[in-house]
Image (cartoon, helix red, strand yellow):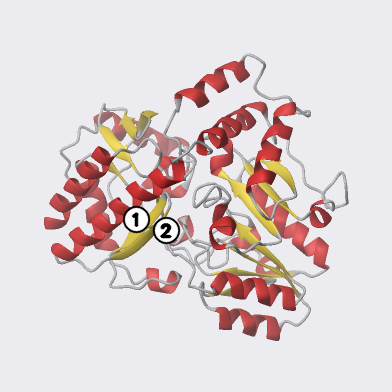
Amino acid sequence: MATTRLKTTQSEEIFAAAQKLMPGGVSSPVRAFKSVGGQPIVFDRVLGAYIWDVDGNQYTDYVGSWGPAICGHAHPEVIAALHDALEKGTSFGAPCYLENVLAQMVIDAVPSIEMVRFVNSGTEACMAVLRLMRAFTGREKAIKFEGCYHGHADMFLVKAGSGIATLGLPDSPGVPKSVTSNTLTAPFNDLEAVKVLFEQNPNEIAGVILEPVVGNAGFIPPDAGFLEGLRKLTQEHGALLVFDEVMTGFRIAYGGVQEKFGVIPDLTTLGKVIGGGLPVGAYGGRQEIMSMVAPAGNVYQAGTLSGNPLAMTAGIKTLELLQRPGTYEHLDRITKRLTEGMLEIAKETGHAACGGQISGMFGFFFNEGPVRNYEDAKKSDLSKFARFHRGMLEHGVYLAPSQFEAGFTSLAHTEADIDRTLEAARTVMSQ
């Protein structure tokens, strides 16, 4: 393990025990710190912009439970609402009024959504939406982009980002070729490659799915005209356009990337923010498409805990908080200052770096840049990032433990938090 000034005795003991109980000692791969070295810290509690580990160390957090904690961890109004909901029970397995409330809020916010179905994770939402797009078009093939991650379902583990990129796995053993044979891939921001795929597979492509702002290969925004080009291409070929806004929904803007860029897909997947930190996912779109979902139609999808009252409660309160004046202005201001500060410090201390942000989502690469796609991202200095990550941890800053993950700020982050983070970055990069 790397030399540390942090007290990590209890983290080490707990993680050592965890490795005998769970594969790799974790419930999700990127948590294991494989790509940055050393050993993960074990969380004890969170509040606002901060984390405390089991050894009592405090960190400023830029992971935010991978995006949901947009209002800050354990926001008192969300916690109070959950306390009230707990008194009524944790799961009904039956309709509850809270589903109507959150559904209406989602429909009002997201331009493409006329009807919505709640599920329990982003993976579930993406699995369901792929089945739906195939049913609606009567076609079997789908296009995804290299480095875009849409959950761990078999058909999406083709040139995927996120944990796959972090662990250096090309795809995943156990995924049959017969399942992925209908998944076509193109480089992100390469409209010509998508045109070629449509030409090579006439009347066979059900749709295109993408993270409209990539977060699972690091933070990569779309080139000017890329999303518009995809919208035009899919319409010309009778295919559907699907935005996976599990990460970007209600974070890039209240109405997501589609509101920010003015490009409206046919279907959208959501998660993270709409559950306020509880397990949640959703997919939605035009009424004529969504009406095919059972029991209204014949496209089957179900879930015992879908629309459970706790996730609905936390989601409703979180979206209420986000509607208050100045929220997105705050997110954009502090995130821009953080990102620009990091890049300026890198330049001053002699490190090649590039990156950017939109609202409360950001990322930077130890890479000359520009980074327009996953292949560009893979040129980053991963060894340098690992040392940087460890150094920032030593100085009380918790960043995503992978070069191939976006970072997140929250309404709880203050200017003082950014000051301390940039001060830490200057110290670490100077070393």
Quarter where residue 54 is shown:
top left
Asked whether residue 248 appears in the rendered view, the answer is yes
Tag 1: residue type?
A: Ser
Residue 236 at x, y percent in the picture: 73, 78
Q: How many marks?
A: 2
Quarter where residue 268 is shown:
bottom right
Give neighbour class at mark 1: few <14, some 14-19, many 20+ (Cα, 10 Å): many
Q: Secondary structure at mark 2?
A: helix
Quarter where residue 81 is shown:
top right
Q: Residue at x 27, y 56 (%)?
A: 386
Direction front: furthest residue: 325
Residue 202 at x, y percent in the picture: 76, 82
Location of the N terminus (image quadrant): top left
The residue tagged 1 is: 35
Q: Residue at x 44, y 28 (%)?
A: 74
Relative to the observer, which residue lies in front, 376 or 75? 75
Tag 2: residue type?
A: Leu
Please state if 136 lies on the left or on the right of 247 as rendered: right
The numbered mark at residue 194 is none
Asked whether residue 150 appears in the rendered view, the answer is no
Using the numbered discs, state the Cα–Cα distance from disc 1 to disc 2 in whole angstroms: 7 Å
Residues marked 1 and 2 touching at CB (< 8 Å): yes
> In the rendered structure, which disc, 1 or 2, sits on the residue that comes first in sequence?
1
Q: Residue at x 87, y 44 (%)?
A: 295
Above-or-below relation of 347 to 53: below
Please state if 245 lies on the left or on the right of 366 as rendered: right
The residue tagged 2 is: 167
Above-or-below relation of 2 to 358: above
